[in-house]
Image (cartoon, rainbow, N blue to C red):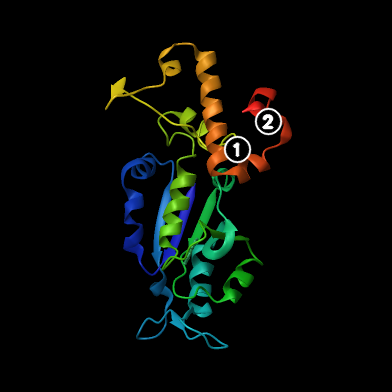
Amino acid sequence: MRIDIVTIFPEYLDPLRGALLGRAIERGLLNLDVHDLRRWTYDVHKGVDDSPYGGGPGMVMKPQVWGEALDEVCAGEPPRLVVPTPAGRPFTQAMAHEYATESRLVFACGRYEGIDQRVIDDASTRMRVDEVSIGDYVLVGGEVAVMVMVEAVARLLPGVLGNPLSAEQDSFSDGLLEGPSYTRPEVWRDRAVPEVLRSGNHKAIDRWRRDQAIERTFARRPDLLAALPPESLDKHDRAL
Ligand SMILES: Oc1ccccc1-c1ccno1
């Protein structure tokens, strides 16, 4: 997979080249290019924003600069363009899986009050464009949101995670939150690991883990339970 990121703060994305993703890049599982948007500015001040039509606070990123940048970065095989914005569609694990099947992703990091809408409208005539939010809060810019999405997608690429089962047993993989996890020691500050996990009875362990996942999801994310297909909960699940 090839990922391109356009930003006015390229150094913000440096952490993506460390640890797990850095190894994926070294192993050729992922190509990552970060581009400084100011490369496509055309005035002495390298301006990237201007005041909003209609008035209001803040500044809007200029369409000319973004248009030139995306023309060049998105050239060749049309990528899927992802534009992080608080006004976007919620980013989910299902979208991470969908993005992980793409051969090219381009992320446009907006700042200020966002990118002139005509940039998205123009790009949509040539490629699939998603305006995506990572949560119901406001950040200063899209760089953090891009790091979240790139990590969520890259870890799903074949060979990136040491154990592929980890991705298969993620929270949300079965529509539920993951239950609690434990490791040694068996007792810590007078708190013992649940006995079933030490029993060696894998049928009982699987049942206990599913019960914990359903109870946690019911308590913290009832919306996920409501979205489950009815057939995915058995009689025991419903009795919880
Ligand atoms: O708050 C933002 C500002 C710029 C770009 C993206 C965001 C955002 C907030 C939540 N998800 O994305």
Residue under the image location 59 percent in, 69 percent down:
120
Residue under the image location 37 percent in, 27 percent down:
182
Residue under the image location 47 percent in, 83 percent down:
57
Residue under the image location 60 percent in, 43 percent down:
222
Q: Position of residue 177 (x, y in %)?
A: 53, 37
The correct choice, above or below, for 104 with respect to 234 in the image is: below
Inspect this view and state whether residue 172 appears.
Answer: no
Looking at this rendering, what residue extends furthest in the top direction? 200
Residue tagged 1: 175
Residue tagged 2: 232
Q: Pointer 1: residues within 10 angstroms few (<14), some, or many (20+)?
A: some
Quadrant of residue 236 within the rendered picture: top right
> Mark 2 vs ligand 1: CB under 8 Å?
no
Q: Mark 2 or mark 1, which is nearer the start of the sequence?
A: 1
Q: How many marks?
A: 2
Which three-letter amino acid code belongs to the residue tagged 1?
Answer: Gly
Q: Using the image as rendered, state which of residue 237 and residue 24 is in the foreground.
A: 237
Q: Kindly state the secondary structure of the residue where label 1 is placed.
A: loop
Q: Could you tell me how far apart the alpha carbons at marks 1 and 2 are, in whole angstroms?
A: 9 Å
The correct choice, above or below, for 60 with respect to 174 in the image is: below
Q: Using the image as rendered, state which of residue 119 and residue 113 is in the foreground.
A: 113
The correct choice, above or below, for 34 with respect to 173 in the image is: below
Which three-letter amino acid code belongs to the residue tagged 2?
Answer: Ser
Please say if the residues under marks 1 and 2 sit with CB atoms less than 8 Å apart: yes
- The quadrant in which the C terminus is found is top right
Q: Kindly state the secondary structure of the residue where label 2 is placed.
A: helix
The correct choice, above or below, for 137 with respect to 114 in the image is: above
Looking at this rendering, what residue extends furthest in the front direction? 190
Q: Position of residue 20 (x, y in %)?
A: 36, 41
